[in-house]
Image (cartoon, helix red, strand yellow):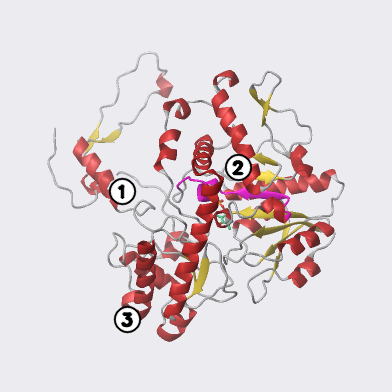
Amino acid sequence: MFKFAIHEEPLINELVCCTSEKTEDVKGVPKSLQKKNTVIIPNLDETQVVRHFHRLSQMNFGIDTGMYPLGSCTMKYNPKICEYIASWEKFACTHPYQDMSTVQGNLQIMFELERMLCEIAGMDYFCLQPAAGAHGEFLGLLLTRAYHKYNGDNERNEVILPDTAHGTNPASASMAGYKTIEIPSTNQGTIDLNALEKTLSEKTACFMLTNPNTLGIFESDILEVQKMVHKSGALLYYDGANMNAIMGKTRPGDMGFDIIHLNLHKTFSTPHGGGGPGSGPVGIKMKLEKFLPIPRICKNNDDEYIFDYDASESIGKIKSFYGNFSVLLKTYVYILMMGGNGLCQASEIAVLNSNYMKKKILDSGKYEMPFKNLRKHEFVLSCEKLKQEKDIRAMDVAKRLLDNGLHPPTVYFPLIVKEALMIEPTESESKKDLDKYIETLVKIADEKPDVVKNAPVNTPTKRLDEVSATKNQILTWKMI
Ligand SMILES: *Cc1c(COP(=O)(O)O)cnc(C)c1O
């Protein structure tokens, strides 16, 4: 029976359920496996279902809706052709258990991608298995441990991090069994070489670093840092989440990093947010090769691509099969399409956009920016002045941006900036869109505190009680 209605409310309130009769004995299915209860299935016509999901999609905000300057996340526009190619049946329908001879193309893509990433990052080898940046960090630290153990250096149980580090860095280090030591940044927002010198010891396994760091500042003392770290016998780890700032300009390998991860879902064309599949390949220098996870993709004497499991010092496997292939494929297409010059240009425009926004916002005098002025692809503002003068906090500004149809920046990170707004416009945005964002931020700073503090009012959901949402999680929904 058709039910005719215009749904103003989410469809879920209008669910018409039909209960199926208890099924007759099904031939061949053992009684113990047959359903005992009736099944409740929503009974809806196609129009209702289409409208329901279409309405839900309209309540969402994505990079295809508008600017999404979520600092450190590189929410850039991802060309649709990458999605299109990843959806080709010949790729999408391959199965990890297929005979190797039938997936030579897939293996070739991964083999060549490893080499492309080596070239871009200045590393000797890459492992494509990790499913996210944090997973890459974890692998990097397992490699660190294997390396020191192999050298009989068993006392090294400390990982040093700057206070600007992303939260996943200390978390990964702890998961890998290390003690973490945080060192403070200088008043320029960079690594304090004296503090590093004092902290490095024969117990240091690794120093983890993001460059440019999470303030968007390039660590210009990096060559000095690498000398100090290596002199102490430790390894230098590069968190590559900010690769979008430096592609084609400089390479972590050339800066002296031993291990790096890249976030393909940030820099290399996979949409993310909402927990979609990611990829955090790990690049290493020659001295760590023998510890890499298995299988490795190689070419045999007959010029065929194979998975090689023969590695006695390998740390083993860290992901089922061989990573998230569709993400790797999109990266491969993106890199080929952009070419070396294209990638370099993407970084240049990302840095230009960020500095344009930074300058215009600071010129307004409404927001401040602690630490050194020179920034790369992102910058971190402080709403401390607004808080002191009008009791408007970073979170209030973020919520008010939603009322203006704009996605907020990252808030309250990095922790060393009070009332932080971390803005990363990426290379995707036009001057017009950057100007609109700047104008809106300036306008919000001039609004009455009540208006800003009660935002958002134009969104499907009003301000959420974030503490209750974390502490009192409701993770299932029951139909009846
Ligand atoms: C995103 C990010 C990570 C973690 O990457 P995931 O892919 O989210 O696990 C690590 N460090 C920095 C600086 C990041 O921005």
Q: How crowded is the residue under tag 1: few (<14 C-alpha within 10 Å), some, or many (20+)?
A: few
Question: Residue at 39% of width from left, 70% of height from top?
Answer: 438
Dividing the image into four quarters, tell me where ligand 1 lies. Answer: bottom right
Task: Judge whether residue 337 is colored magenta.
Answer: no
According to the image, label 1 marks what residue?
57
Near-viewer residue (411 or 66): 66
Q: SS for tag 1? A: helix
Position in image of residue 425 (x %, y %): 45, 61
According to the image, label 2 marks what residue?
130
Q: Which residues are magenta?
A: 256-271
Q: Earlier in the sequence, mark 1 or mark 3?
A: 1
Task: Judge whether residue 270 is colored magenta.
Answer: yes
| Residue projecting furthest to the right | 152
According to the image, label 3 marks what residue?
448
Q: Is residue 342 left or right of residue 8?
A: right
Q: Amino acid at mark 2?
A: Pro
Question: Residue at 55% of width from left, 43% of height from top?
Answer: 279
Answer whether residue 355 is visible to the viewer in this image. Answer: yes
Count all numbered tags in the image, as a single digit.
3
Image quarter hosting the C terminus? top left
Near-viewer residue (328 or 319): 328
